[in-house]
Amino acid sequence: MNFRLLCRVLGIVCLLIGGSMCFSLPFAFPLLANRTYLPAAEQIEKGGIQALVLSMAISILVGIVLMFSGRGGRGASLFRKEAMAIVGLSWVMATVLGALPFYLSGTETAAGQSITFIEAMFESQAGFSTTGATILTDLESPDSVPHCILFWRSWTHFLGGLGIVVLFVAILGQGSAGKAMVRAEMPGPSKEGSMPRMQHTALMFAGIYCGLNLILTLIYMIEGMTLFDGLCHAFGTMATGGFSTYNRSLGGFDSPLIEYTTIVFMILAGTNFTLLYLTMIGGPKRMFNDVEFQTFIGIIVGLTAAIMFFGIRGGDVGFESVPQGLRNGLFQVVSIITTTGYGTADFDQWNNFARGSLLLLMFVGGCAGSTGGGLKVIRHVLFYKILGMEIELAYRPRVVRLIRIGDATADDPAMLRGIMVYFCLILGIFIASWMLLVTFEPSSTWGYTDDAVAAADDSTLDEKLLDCASAVAATLNNIGPGLGVVGATQNYAGFSQGAKFLFVWLMLLGRVEVFSVLVLIFPAFWRRA
Amino acid sequence: MNFRLLCRVLGIVCLLIGGSMCFSLPFAFPLLANRTYLPAAEQIEKGGIQALVLSMAISILVGIVLMFSGRGGRGASLFRKEAMAIVGLSWVMATVLGALPFYLSGTETAAGQSITFIEAMFESQAGFSTTGATILTDLESPDSVPHCILFWRSWTHFLGGLGIVVLFVAILGQGSAGKAMVRAEMPGPSKEGSMPRMQHTALMFAGIYCGLNLILTLIYMIEGMTLFDGLCHAFGTMATGGFSTYNRSLGGFDSPLIEYTTIVFMILAGTNFTLLYLTMIGGPKRMFNDVEFQTFIGIIVGLTAAIMFFGIRGGDVGFESVPQGLRNGLFQVVSIITTTGYGTADFDQWNNFARGSLLLLMFVGGCAGSTGGGLKVIRHVLFYKILGMEIELAYRPRVVRLIRIGDATADDPAMLRGIMVYFCLILGIFIASWMLLVTFEPSSTWGYTDDAVAAADDSTLDEKLLDCASAVAATLNNIGPGLGVVGATQNYAGFSQGAKFLFVWLMLLGRVEVFSVLVLIFPAFWRRA
């Protein structure tokens, strides 16, 4: 392990995060935040500024120390071990530094209840991992959260999304499945991606990402948002994060225009950035020929239709008419599949088909190489193709078939095995975390004061089992809201500190696609090979 | 596809099943059933005899027709396709023929409610697949079920268990994982298993199985059961089925002696029959050196301890004292892991840890090559070893390691891939069936008359989602009881006909380890290769 190089890169990450904190400062002032402050609130905003400046100082100091420790550390070629350690540790470092502004400003999770450091880490991780799960109950009162801190909260989404686009998509190629796709799709003779090409791609992708953020902000402002709200919601949409500045999330605007705009941009954010880039050069034909994108759109259309059908038939809330049903159904489906997690309707009140299928949809996720989380559409496509092939192999043991995705063939056995392994790993982590939560989370989280009384009631038990499952699914797949106590109108504030700490790791595991973090806890990983 | 051979084998299956129906006839008479009948009940028993004789006639007739159609059909070597078709179709045939006695005798699922043919198939499949799920509400009243039919019900367990031991374990080698183990464990130079050796093994295994059934019956009778009860419960235990002749299942005897006896024999039934055979020859050392058996016992001991701890701490029903907790905890853990499904306590009333972990335990199952269902312990052992290796491969791409099980190495890449594929297939079937049930099962199953009112209540929705999941898990893994409406004190009578039909297929899929049945629905399977 090249520790000097590791320190140097981590140092750069600290400096970047610390430096970018200054962008939140202007929003402490009424002019930019477009809200009128009471004198008491002004005092609180000042607290926010102090916290931000202090956090900046700490981050930059840590960055300089790390850079200094890592001086002379150069790597002509990066081994996979180093790359994984850098990715995993950078994310951990970002989470801790990102938690400082929340913690130091004394943000309140509920009225009169100051945030703990674990809770601050939860909020910071939910931002960087673009999950959008929150433990803040009241976002609208400046007594609870100063505006500059609220901006920092959404800014972590922007940084997280940028990190994903640059790190995973452009440089690392988003896991083996994504890499195979990038290789197959990228023009030019270089198959391995030389250094200048990688830098060029990273810059291009960062440009597309920032450009889309800017365009969306402008559209939002035209549609009636303030600069502050426009920026925050654009960050939330393009990073597929889902942090809002309103308690009722995007539903607070109650505007079909804003919702349909958001739907379009969520879909763009959930699309492979390589594909967006190629579409920009080669026109939209490229996009609609892509198997992953076709499947992605197909799932959205099919599931929305089914949810509308069952919703209207069952007379659910929000399905009073077809346009109403389309608006609510489509928004929730897109919000969940892209792992954004914005809420406009409380899908927890819908029928069982909708609840069950949205819970499953959490595991689908966006396209590979997008800012979306989850298992990714391409993994599902390959997964079903592999299963079909294996069933045929069961009765035709000698048949040889190649798995085709569009015009390309996926023939790397390690990649195909990797798909199965990834599904199984996610399943294993899901089950283990669910059991931990179910076992150790006290009944008070569900509002029952007496454990024994609560335990005697079957429906309470069912609620616990299901809510825990949805909370794990929503954090592991970087969605945000789930069912029940973590439903669209609820948040994660009620969970115990231990559970919040677990969620921090789940969000991290989901974001870096498990391996980069999981290896960190293996002693063998740190040993000299 | 060699259709003549197929017909001939199916014909033999029909003749065997039809012929074996005569064993149920004696139990129509009070002397053997050890119960005194009222005159009305005697009339009903006569109906049972008529139904059995008619079913026998039909089965033998169908058998003769099939044998006749298949005359001259000989296979010097059986192709894999034929073997799969034979296994899958034999089980379907057995289910349909086994349903005849229930249907023709007019068995009542609840007071005054005659069984439908789908329900009769459910009961028959639950017997042959050794699941033990039931749709009969009252077993103790001879008005609902004649004794000879009750005996037939348990006899299907015996036949199913015998079929598994002979077909899967001795002849087919229980899938690739089991086959690798059999190859590694079986003494002698022949690796492939010649025909005489296979016949010898099949006879040996059938002998062990029948012997254990006989011994257990005798022990039960010494412990106070009648011949009828002893035989029925021995069949239920050794086949890891779980049909009882009492409404309260084995709990009806309320005898710690009987329960501990059952625990020992359930563990034996959940153990690899090859291992039992080798232990008989070579002594118990062989048994305790076996990795799968060690893991199996380890899970039972560990989980029982954990459930006792949480049960006693939480003051659950049935955990009033340590001996009480041990008796109830151990029985339920063994009953679920071996996929027997006998109930002595209502674990649905226990704490969340117990409910959650027992639900997960359903997917573990017994050892490969036993009569137990589920995914099998050895698959789990290999699964975790593969995942560990893949994580290491993520940062050491060039490392080459062999997966070791005890002294043997599992190095067949197709087998290792097969493990992952099997986990993913089971997961896929589980999820698809769960969604089907959740979507189409009416609220009336849960006792709510008005769908809209029921849907408005969150806890009702949670109950539905969870109960459906447990019902699918309990049938797919051949357990029997689940949580909620299919809990230990409940049964499957309340489900709609469509749901019952789905369960019939799930039990079948679980029993024949998916492939043999799944391929039957592929048109390509039936085409000439």
Image (cartoon, coloured by chain):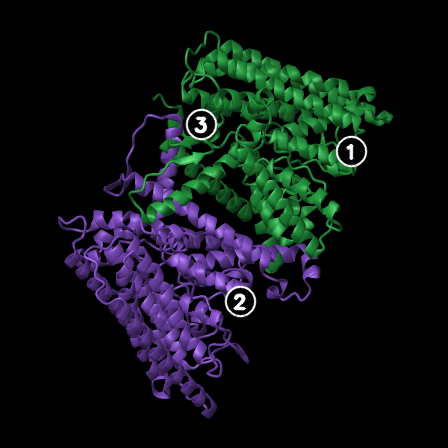
Chain colours: A purple, B green
Between marks 3 and 1, how big is the CA–CA gap?
45 Å
Task: Tell me if mark 1 has few (under 14), some (14-19) or many (20+) residues whose alpha carbon lies within 10 angstroms of its own.
Answer: some
* Camera-nearest residue between A176 and B490: A176
Mark 1 or 2: in front is 2
Are circles 3 and 2 on residues that touch, CB within 8 Å? no
Q: Position of residue A507 (x, y in %)?
A: 42, 60
Rounded to the nearest angstrom, the CA distance separating label 1 from label 2 is 52 Å
Instruction: Kindly identify the amino acid type of the residue bearing the numbered disc 3.
Output: Ala
Q: Residues within 10 Å of mark 3 (few under 14, many from 20)?
A: some
Taking B54 as reference, is A466 left or right?
left
Residue reaching furthest bottom?
A39
Query: Both on one chain, marks 3 and 2?
Result: no
Q: Residue B452, can we see it? A: no
Q: How many marks?
A: 3
Chain to which mark 3 belongs: B
Query: In the figure, is residue A42 to the left or right of B9?
Result: left
Please report the residue visible at 49 percent of the width from the left and 39 percent of the height from the top: B380
Q: x, y (%) of residue A78?
A: 23, 55
Q: Is residue A520 left or right of residue B196?
A: left
Decide which of tag 3 and tag 1 comes sooner along the chain. 1
Viewer-nearest residue: B458 or A420: A420
Mark 2 neighbour class, 10 Å CA radius: few under 14, some 14 to 19, many 20 or more:
some
Secondary element at image label 3: helix
Q: Residue type at mark 1: give it.
A: Glu
Residue B134 seen: yes
- Image mark 2: chain: A
Q: Amino acid at mark 2?
A: Gln
Q: Find residue A497 and name its label.
A: 2
The Cα–Cα distance between marks 3 and 2, rounded to whole angstroms, is: 47 Å
Residue named by callout 1: B140
Q: Which mark is residue B180?
A: 3
Give residue B76's position: percent from left, percent from top: 42, 10
